[in-house]
Image (cartoon, coloured by chain):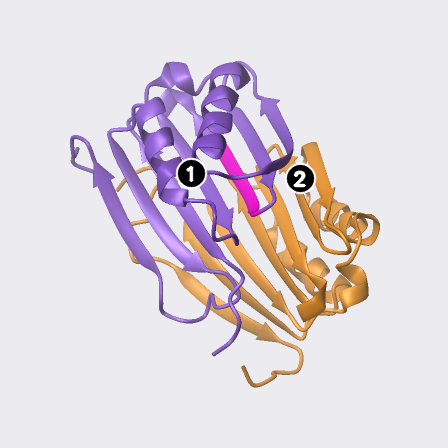
Chain colours: A purple, B orange
Amino acid sequence: MRKDYGRHYLVDLLGCDPETLRFVGPTREIFVRAARESKATVVGEDFHQFEPEGVSGVLLIAESHLSVHTWPEDGFAAVDIFTCGEEMDADVAIAVLTAAFRAERTVVKVLTRGRLDEPDTETEARAKAEKSP
Amino acid sequence: MRKDYGRHYLVDLLGCDPETLRFVGPTREIFVRAARESKATVVGEDFHQFEPEGVSGVLLIAESHLSVHTWPEDGFAAVDIFTCGEEMDADVAIAVLTAAFRAERTVVKVLTRGRLDEPDTETEARAKAEKSP
């Protein structure tokens, strides 16, 4: 079996509170908290404000990265959590983000880097109040 | 059908030239070139040097992001290209990175953000000289 290089969580957050997604300030604060509570070690960051609203941001962490892109007009955020450490708990980060963005539905896909061509992906939807697609 | 929020290319590059993966300078230069040649619009960046070697880096682009994490000791790089624009050509970025890192094998998985729970993913291995796993 080939070596693996960590777990990559792709997280789509649907039905979020748009107020949390419009500007760098609130989005970054939530993101930094998710990193801290999941025991990630932040080593760098960059956030970008789109006009009139919308945010792209990344935290480089010792374990790899957390990234976010927001579409406040749709209450949608696309988050990535790529972690190759044992200490960090991605599920804690996902729970913090789901609660703080007030997502109605969170879809998580998990892939193993270094083995993308193996059929070992997991997909899970976590719903507070399931909406029809 | 739900709206989609762009295409996310997960790219594992195997059998790379370790010299291209050790330090921020060469890795960043290759990455900036891949962004430029694929017609991405860079809006921010952050790169981190691990000691004694290894790089994490991200380019925030108007279309979303490009990220890289390197394991020079294994000749491995994990790249993400997340693009929600029509102008940018991710395949050009993948070709530039494959050539510049001298990857022997490039595995690409493509997902549609906003529809992670739909079974529409594509996986493709591009090999210059296939190695056994």
Q: Which residue is depicted at the point 31% across and 58% down?
A: A122
At horizontal 72% and vertical 64% (from top left) the residue drawn is B72
> Residue B69 location, x and y as percent?
64, 53
Amino acid carrying label 2: it is Leu
Q: Amino acid at mark 1?
A: Tyr
Quick one: SS at disc 1? loop
Q: Is any part of residue B83 visible from this angle?
A: yes
Are the residues tagged 1 and 2 within 8 Å (C-beta)? no
Which residue appears at 60% of the width and 52% of the height? B90
Tally the numbered discs. 2
Q: Which mark is residue A111?
A: none
Q: Of tags 1 and 2, which is closer to the observer? A: 2
The residue range painted magenta reads A63-69
Q: Main secondary structure of the magenta part?
A: strand
Chain designation of label 2: B
- Residue A11 vs residue B94: left or right? left
Q: Which residue is mark 2?
A: B59
| Disc on res. B5 | 1
Does residue B87 appear in the picture of this structure? no
